[in-house]
Amino acid sequence: MKKRKRWNKKSFFILAFIAPAILLFVLIYAYPLLNIIATSFCEWNSKNFTAPKFLGISHMFDNYKKLFTIDANFQQALINSLKWVVLTLVIQVPFSVLTALVLSKKNKGWRFIRNVFVIPNIISTAAIGLIFLNMYSPSRGIITEICNIISPGSNVSVLAEENMAFWGVTFSFILFGGSSCLLLLTQIFSTDSSIYEAAKVDGASSLQIDMKITLPLLKPMIGTVAVMAANYGLLLYNEIALITGGGPDNATYSLSYYIYKTALGSLKLNFARANAAGVIQMLIGIILVGMIYRIFSVKKGLEE
Amino acid sequence: MRKKVKERPESGTVLEKIFRYFVMLIVAFISIYPILWVFISSFKEKPGGLGLPKEWVFDGYITIFTELDIQTYFLNSLVITVISTVLSVTVVSMAAYVVARMQFKGKGLVTLMFSTTLFIPAVSISFPIYRLLGDLGLKDTRLGVIIVYSGLGIAVTYFILHSYFASIPKEMEEAARVDGCGYFGTFFRIIVPIAKPGLSTAAILAFLNNWNEFYFASILLKSPEKMTIPALLGQFTSAYSKNLNGMFSAIIVAVVPTIIVFCLLSETFVKSLTAGAVKG
């Protein structure tokens, strides 16, 4: 009898302690997630704002079909987002790894450089976006001025031309791998230093040590960093909203920016289609994580 | 143990050293130059371009403190960030503690639920959240943003705290229980003080993310007097772009507090950033 009472007290405690977090989870993640999945199979736009209507079994994938067949903005957004994923993997990740390897040698000033590298990651991306918007401006920026010094009269306007605008957005984030570098460095420093001592005794050069010992040991952490970077590329929004607004001529749309525009930010709203794009974005993210973890054979699961 | 190793540079050929300093120089340049450029430009009569100001003017800084009233936005940011950080760390720490320390049905499910949030992109679910807050009458309110921020980072906070609680010796609680401390008392009076380093790691990370959050702030907050600093910066692309001095000064004023705090507490920050990212 007494034991039962105590058990009740304990289960009340467990419930009381878990309930608030579950409530937040339901409110911010579970309900919205189920909502976008369900409404992605509906007809739901500015005409029937209050009542989404199920498309019917035979037409239930119409929103998805339309995204891939008639929605040029979505297709552009998808291509761009995938490009940004690839670019983070081939530019940001190797750059962070290189920097981490360099800093791990602890040459004078390494700690300062490590901290400086983190600064662009800890200040608001809204500020970063505004800074690059100004740097790219032909009237007050520096890119146009520098190009005019190299080739007088070229009057480059980064954000006016589609291809250049894409690279403009790309360079507003792609080199800022400070937090990744931090993680890699921590990992390098936590490996047993006797391995390095032994290699040095055997006469290995520091390049050999980096290539043959450090990098292989670093592989799982590179995988983690790659997942984070790829995710950033896939979800890119702030830089686009602040620098190009998706332009010129929708050339710099990303999936996130497409979703925002389609659900909230334009005159021709189509909530169902935005939500379908959201589901696709999420699926791509899951596939990417799976692929990268497989490539880097990261054994450590997310829930350790 | 690492601390004992003396910090001496690894040997290397001259060529290697030159290469290393070259990389370090590039890293420093790309990280500092954009901010430095805005800083220098903010003192120019006509902001922008290369070179130093011919004449140093402070008009921009005066305008943003007098006309733009940037203090209001700082206060909004501070209120929203502090409350949402405290709220999410408190709520999540309670859940993480129970899962880390007690046996009950559905334990694995709780962890699984929080893990799935790592795969749900915030923008893709923003429309239902936007509508939900509208239905609750919380659109364009600071409370609405606070609720969203409290929920957004639950996964990372959860994993940091879960592993921290799991590392605390069980004897601590047993002793407290023997002394007649209830479950609630044990948590708040025994566990929380011990877990302070873990809690502060999680809190710093949550604070940083909430302080910088732009997307939800920009779609949820429409009245200027409620906006946070990032939302205000978003306005500069359209509304205030005529006042260039104001814009350049506002960027500097917006980023300098973060940079100063980071310089003062860099080691603590480094710990938070690595703890959060390992799990994220």
Image (tube, rainbow, N blue to C red):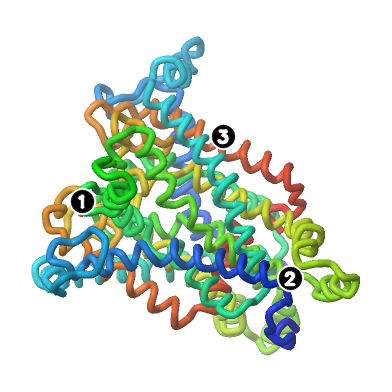
Please, what is the three-letter code of the amino acid marked with disc 2? Answer: Lys
Q: Position of residue A167 (x, y in %)?
A: 41, 41
Neighbourhood count class around disc 1 (C-alpha, 10 Å): few under 14, some 14–19, many 20 upward:
some
Q: Position of residue A223 (x, y in %)?
A: 68, 51
Q: Nearer the viewer, residue A268 or A61?
A: A268
Q: Position of residue B40 (x, y in %)?
A: 26, 69
Q: Which mark is residue B222?
A: 1
Q: Residue furthest right?
A: A202
Q: Which comes sooner in the sequence, label 3 or label 2?
A: 2
Neighbourhood count class around disc 2 (C-alpha, 10 Å): few under 14, some 14–19, many 20 upward:
few
B156 sits to left or right of A142: right
Residue found at x 75% / y 58%: A215
C-alpha span from label 3 to label 1 = 31 Å
Point out the frontmost of discs 3 and 2. 3
Please, what is the three-letter code of the amino acid marked with disc 3? Answer: Leu
Q: Is residue B79 above or below residue A58?
A: below
Q: Is residue A35 above or below residue B269?
A: above
Q: Nearer the viewer, residue A55 or B198?
A: B198
Residue denoted by label 2: A3
C-alpha span from label 1 to label 2 = 55 Å
Residue found at x 88% / y 73%: A198
Numbered disc total: 3
C-alpha span from label 3 to label 2 = 48 Å
Residue found at x 59% / y 58%: A96
Determine the secondary structure under disc 1: loop
Q: Chain of mark 1?
A: B
Q: Nearer the viewer, residue A292 or A302?
A: A292
Q: Give the quadrant of the C terminus of chain A.
A: bottom right
Q: Is residue B9 above or below residue A218?
A: below
Residue found at x 38% / y 56%: A125
